Image (cartoon, grey):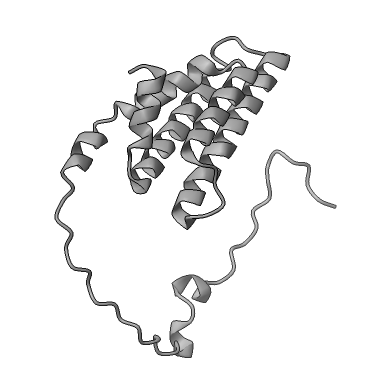
Amino acid sequence: MTGDELRNWYMSLTNSSKQIFLAFVSHDLTIHGRAFTLDSLSGEQLHRAFNGVNELQHQISGHIAGIGLDRDRYPDDVLWQILLEKAGAYGLVNHLNSSLERASSSKVWERLKYPPIALPSMPRNTTAPAPRKAEHQCGPACLRAPVKSHPNPSLPPRA
């Protein structure tokens, strides 16, 4: 998919699917972050790359929470633009595009087209548990004798 097709596809997702998609993107970005040291980045380049991934993670995780809370979030098209601008500022456009593409190609999207039938929830027990009796408040670990300290043979003896 092109960038615009991918953005339009994302915009068409339900809020719960957007959360899943963004979690996939976030997960994939962490893999890119791990690879920075393998890519022979060091010093200022490595620091800048990690800062960039951190900024992307910050925006994505905040948006996931905002979707769940249904407040305190940018509109989706604004988030998309912010991610592209942050990635551009830190030289991570290819990394972000790769993560977006990989997240959109997950097999989970086929399964979500035909969600499983929702089963009725099980009734919950809302009564408070009875207070614990004294003999049940600690397990066998509490009843053992204290462990004797063994001196370390590599250290000089104490005076």
Q: Residue at x 55, y 72 (%)?
A: 145
Residue 29 lies, with reference to residue 68, above or below; the image says above
Q: Residue furthest right?
A: 159
In front of the other: 121 or 38: 121
Horizontal and vertical percent position of residue 117: 14, 55
159 with respect to 145 (left or right): right
User: Which corner quadrant holds the N terminus?
Assistant: top left
Q: Residue at x 70, y 38 (%)?
A: 154
Horizontal and vertical percent position of residue 84: 54, 24
In front of the other: 108 or 150: 108
Q: Is residue 101 visible?
A: no
> How many numbered marks have been drawn onto this rendered protein structure?
0
Q: Residue at x 68, y 42 (%)?
A: 153
Horizontal and vertical percent position of residue 118: 18, 59
In front of the other: 35 or 11: 11
118 with respect to 103 (left or right): left
130 with respect to 87 (left or right): left
Residue 151 lies, with reference to residue 29, above or below; the image says below
In front of the other: 64 or 85: 85
